[in-house]
Image (spheres, rainbow, N blue to C red):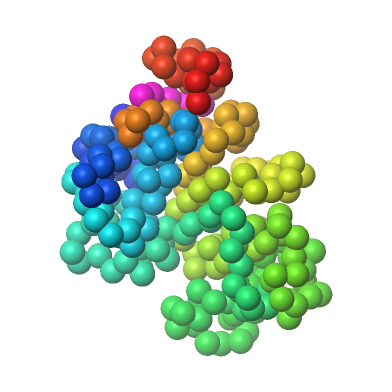
C-alpha cells in the first residue's frame, strides 16, 4: 500500500511476516509510510499494530522466539541487514511508550542521557541540546528553573513530554508513539496531540492508538489492522468518512473492537 501521492515515502515495508514462536502475529504486511507526517495505526487489541510499530526500531529483537520474513527499509536502507547497528538505528528511530518512563535522574540528565551516550561531553553543547529538546517538547517554560530536580517529581503529562524530549535529544528521523497518551488525563492528552502536530513538520511520526477520535484529530494517514493483517490504509479523512472495506466501517462505527 503506497503513501499518498503528494508525499515522499520514508519507510517501506514489503511482504513482512512476523512470528512469535509458532504464532503468526503479522501477515504479509506491505505499506509505505510518508515522511514528515503522522501515520496512525488503529485496530482492536492484539491485532498487530504495536507489533508492527516495534519492528521499526527492532524492539521485537528482545523477545525470544521472534522470527521475521520480508523487508523494512528506512530512507532506502534495510534495517534488518546484518550490517545494521541496532543502537544507531534506535538513535534514528526514537520511541515513546504507553507509560511515561523517565529515568530516576534529574530532568537535565534525562534529556542529556542519549547525547552523552553518543559521545557528547561538552557542557555548553549539552546545555543547548537540553534546552532545544525541552522547547521542542513544549516543556521548557515549565521546568527551566528546576532542571536539577528529579524527573519523577513531574506530573504524568510532564513526564511523557520529558520522554519525548529525551527521544528528540538524539535528533531522530522517526518518532514512534505507542499509545503515548492512554495513561494521561484529557488535558495532558491534548498537549501531547498538539505537540505531535507541531513536530510532524520536522519528524516522521507513527502512532499506535486505541482512540479513534485521536487518530481522526491528529493523523494524516490511518492504517486499520485486524488479526495481524492490514485491512485498509488511506488518508485519515477518507478512511473515516468513506471506508472501502466493510470491516473498517464496522470497527469505526463501534460494531466490534
Q: Residue at x 75, y 70 (%)?
A: 153
What is the tally of numbered marks visible in this picture? 0
Residue 63: percent from left, percent from top:
32, 58
Which is more toward the observer, 14 or 197?
14
* Position of 118 relative to 69 (above/below): below
Q: Is residue 197 visible?
A: yes
In the image, which residues are magenta? Answer: 231-236
Residue 21: percent from left, percent from top:
23, 49
* Position of 61 relative to 239 (above/below): below
Q: Residue at x 73, y 45 (%)?
A: 185
Q: Magenta segment: does it hold 232?
A: yes
Q: Quadrant of residue 145?
A: bottom right
Which is more toward the observer, 137 or 43?
43
Determine the residue located farthest toward the front in the rendered image. 22
Residue 50: percent from left, percent from top:
43, 44
Name the magenta segment's main secondary structure. strand
Q: Quadrant of residue 65?
A: bottom left
Q: Quadrant of residue 131?
A: bottom right
Residue 123: percent from left, percent from top:
61, 87
Q: Residue at x 34, y 51 (%)?
A: 55
Where is the N terminus found, in terms of image quarters?
top left
* Position of 184 relative to 225 (above/below): below
Q: Is residue 8 visible?
A: no
Which is more toward the observer, 255 or 77?
255
* Position of 70 relative to 96 (above/below): above
Determine the residue located farthest toward the bottom in the rendered image. 122
Q: Magenta segment: does it hold 137?
A: no
Q: Residue at x 53, y 55 (%)?
A: 97
Amino acid at each position: 500500500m503506497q503513501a499518498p501521492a503528494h508525499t515522499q515515502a520514508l519507510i517501506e515495508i514489503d511482504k513482512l511476516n512476523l512470528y512469535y514462536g509458532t504464532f503468526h502475529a503479522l501477515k504479509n504486511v506491505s505499506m509505505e509510510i510518508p515522511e514528515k507526517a503522522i501515520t496512525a495505526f488503529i485496530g482492536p487489541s492484539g491485532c498487530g499494530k504495536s507489533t508492527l510499530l516495534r519492528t521499526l526500531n527492532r524492539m521485537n529483537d528482545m523477545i525470544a522466539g521472534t522470527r521475521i520474513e520480508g523487508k523494512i527499509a528506512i530512507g532506502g536502507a534495510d534495517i534488518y541487514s546484518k550490517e545494521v547497528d541496532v543502537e544507531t538505528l534506535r538513535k534514528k528511530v526514537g520511541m515513546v511508550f504507553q507509560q511515561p518512563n523517565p529515568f530516576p535522574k534529574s530532568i537535565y540528565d534525562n534529556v542529556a542521557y542519549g547525547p552523552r551516550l553518543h559521545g557528547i561531553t561538552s557542557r555548553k553543547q549539552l546545555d543547548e541540546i537540553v534546552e532545544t529538546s525541552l522547547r521542542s517538547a513544549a516543556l521548557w517554560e515549565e521546568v527551566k528553573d528546576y532542571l536539577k530536580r528529579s524527573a519523577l517529581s513531574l506530573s504524568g503529562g510532564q513526564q511523557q513530554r520529558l520522554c519525548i524530549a529525551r527521544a528528540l535529544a538524539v535528533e531522530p528521523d522517526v518518532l514512534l508513539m505507542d499509545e503515548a497518551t492512554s495513561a494521561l488525563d484529557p488535558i495532558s492528552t491534548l498537549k501531547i496531540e498538539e505537540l505531535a502536530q507541531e513536530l510532524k513538520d520536522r519528524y516522521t511520526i507513527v502512532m499506535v492508538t486505541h482512540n479513534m477520535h485521536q487518530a481522526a484529530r491528529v493523523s494524516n494517514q490511518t492504517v486499520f489492522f485486524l488479526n495481524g493483517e492490514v485491512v485498509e490504509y488511506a488518508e485519515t479523512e477518507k478512511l473515516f468518512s468513506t471506508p472501502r472495506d466493510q470491516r473498517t466501517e464496522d470497527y469505526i462505527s463501534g460494531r466490534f473492537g
